[in-house]
Amino acid sequence: MSAALFADRVGLAYRTPMEVVGGFLDRAPVPLLDMAAALGLSVDMGASLPAGISGQITHIRRADGDRYHIDVNGQDGAARRRFTLAHEIAHFLLHRAFLDDALTDDRMYRSRLGDVMERQANRLAAQLLMPANLVRVAWNAGARDVASLARTFDVSGQAMEIRLRELGLEG
Ligand SMILES: [Zn+2]
């Protein structure tokens, strides 16, 4: 699909998907559902999925254009569901050319796409949930404990710990 068609379909006013995403990375917690809606994605945060599945993204072909739908396992805790949503948005941004129909992620965020693309999706998910500039601002303002930073960004303590290490911000 050409960029112009994509813009027409979801009313992006000819902005690229990454530009659309950038408009949501200036506040914490990042409003992921609003971001998904702006990208033209429909989302079910309470989907009935098998216990071994964290989420999936489905490519729906329609006469009036392609659609993408994200399902997040409703049995998972809030922080995990939020990470899953970010991970599936990342697959849309990075890998939608590979989404023939549905892509399913297990609890370790493994899928048929393989490890390299899964690592890409996890990295971008962390960047969407914990934008580097916002984390640095919070850190420099004195928020140095993982638990309160995790609350600020609405992520798990483990995800925040990994992100701080990535950004070279360690206590
Ligand atoms: Zn994945």
Image: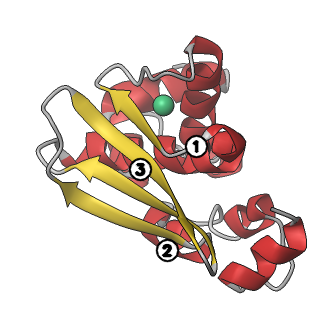
Q: Residue at the location (63% across, 81% down)?
A: 64
Q: Quadrant of residue 29?
A: bottom left
Q: Secondary structure at mark 3?
A: helix
Q: Residues within 10 Å of mark 1 (few under 14, many from 20)?
A: few
Where does residue 41 sit, x and y in percent of width and height?
51, 67
Q: Is residue 135 above or below residue 54?
A: below
Name the element at disc 1.
Answer: loop
Question: From mark 2 to mark 1, how far is it between C-alphas?
Answer: 25 Å
Q: For numbered disc 2, what is the local secondary structure?
A: helix
Task: Classify 103 as above or below 78.
Answer: above
Indicate the amino acid at tag 2.
Asp
- Residue 79's tag is none
Disc 3 designates what residue?
85
On residue 34, the disc is 2
Mark 3 or 1: the one toward you: 1
Residue under the point 87% across and 65% down: 2
Q: Residues within 10 Å of mark 3 (few under 14, many from 20)?
A: many
Question: Would residue 4 be found to the left or right of residue 146 on screen?
Answer: right
Q: Is residue 12 above or below residue 96?
A: below
The alpha-carbon separation of the residues under discs 2 and 3 comes to 12 Å
Q: Can you give x and y, in whole percent of width and height, for residue 53 in the image? A: 25, 32
In this picture, is 41 found above or below 124?
Answer: below
Residue 148, percent across and down? 34, 44
Mark 3 and mark 1: span between their CA atoms? 19 Å
Q: Is residue 164 left or right of residue 23?
A: left
Q: Which amino acid does the dot numbered 3 rest on?
A: Leu
- Work out whether residue 163 or residue 87 is closer to the camera in this orientation and state it: 87
- Front position in the image: 40 or 155: 40
